[in-house]
Amino acid sequence: MLKIFCGVARLPFLTLTLLCILLAASAVWYQYGIFSLPLTAMVLLMALAAHISVNAFNEYFDFHSGLDLLTERTPFSGGSGTLVAAPEQTKLALALAISCLLFVTVAGLWLSAQLGWHLLWLGIPGVLLIYSYTQYVNKLPLLCLIAPGLGFGGFMTLGAYWVLAGQLDAMAISLSALLALLISNLLLLNQFPDVEADQQVGRRHLPIVLGRKPSAHIYQILLVSCYSLLLLAVWLQWLPALSLLALLTLPLAWRLIRDVPRYANAPEQLVPTMGHNVLLTHAFPGLVLLGVLISSFISPHGG
């Protein structure tokens, strides 16, 4: 049972959720000197439940569509294969997805009742995205591109900041936009090996509609935009100067800009590059987080 849960929930991929919430909490501490352990723990539990729900719905729907039987799995794409190995556990996967979604919904309503119903502006579309991502969003190319970034950068990080700080500001928007660009790029590249399989079950993401090579150029544009936004946000003092620690990832980013188009049409050779992309997606916000934390001690409360 535990093995099935871990597989369907895709536990190794939940590290991004932890980074998003830690970044939001540290930014609130830097800006306002506010930190509530119970509230932060609640937000983190909700974020983890939301991510697990998306993953479990994805496992369930992809198994029932037959996609999991067509996909050549990589360490970074193609699902976990849990239900292919244990098809009798499909109801457990669906129950996990629904239970986590219900928890997010109930906890979100409780938070909104305590802190303000304005939070539902992010909460309602966030819940809808959790359920609709696999079944519907993957059939709409542009929405499929922005949805992962919107989910993690917008609903998760921006929502966490709003809950913890009680308001939004330029720092919150900057962080959410940086994460949105990185995570949309992460999912975009992970779609490359699955083009043929995804096409057979009716998906229509950008690598299917435009092709892998043009999508590789979109990847490059989004990655350059991420670093440009970081520089702009620091220049405008929306982020502390030590956020520029993220520039230490530039050699890795350059390698990705070079290798993604080079291996775009060779999925088997793309796997190491996908690994580098996962590393970048963690290292960049991790270094921004470090910069914000150090800045909190050097110049507390945004000073």
Image: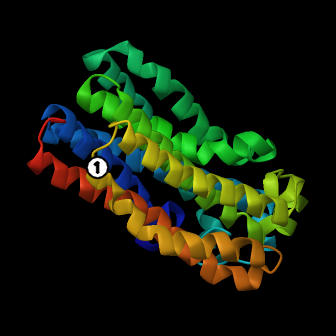
Q: Nearer the viewer, residue 252 or 207?
A: 252
State how the image is colored: rainbow
Residue 189 sits above or below residue 128 on the image: below
Q: Amino acid at mark 1?
A: Ala
Q: Is residue 103 visible?
A: no
x and y percentages locating residue 27 in the rendered image? 26, 42
Q: Specify the quadrant that holds the N terminus.
A: bottom left
Q: Is residue 258 visible?
A: yes
For image coordinates 15% across by 36% down, the residue present is 303
For image coordinates 38% across by 36% down, the residue present is 236
For image coordinates 76% across by 71% down, the residue present is 261
x and y percentages locating residue 2 in the rendered image? 41, 70
Residue beneath label 1, please?
A: 241
Secondary structure beneath dot 1 equals: helix
Residue 120 sits above or below residue 64 on the image: above
Query: In the rendered image, which quarter is residue 146 located in?
Result: top right
Q: Nearer the viewer, residue 164 or 202?
A: 164
Crowding at mark 1 (Cα within 10 Å: few <14, some 14-19, many 20+): some
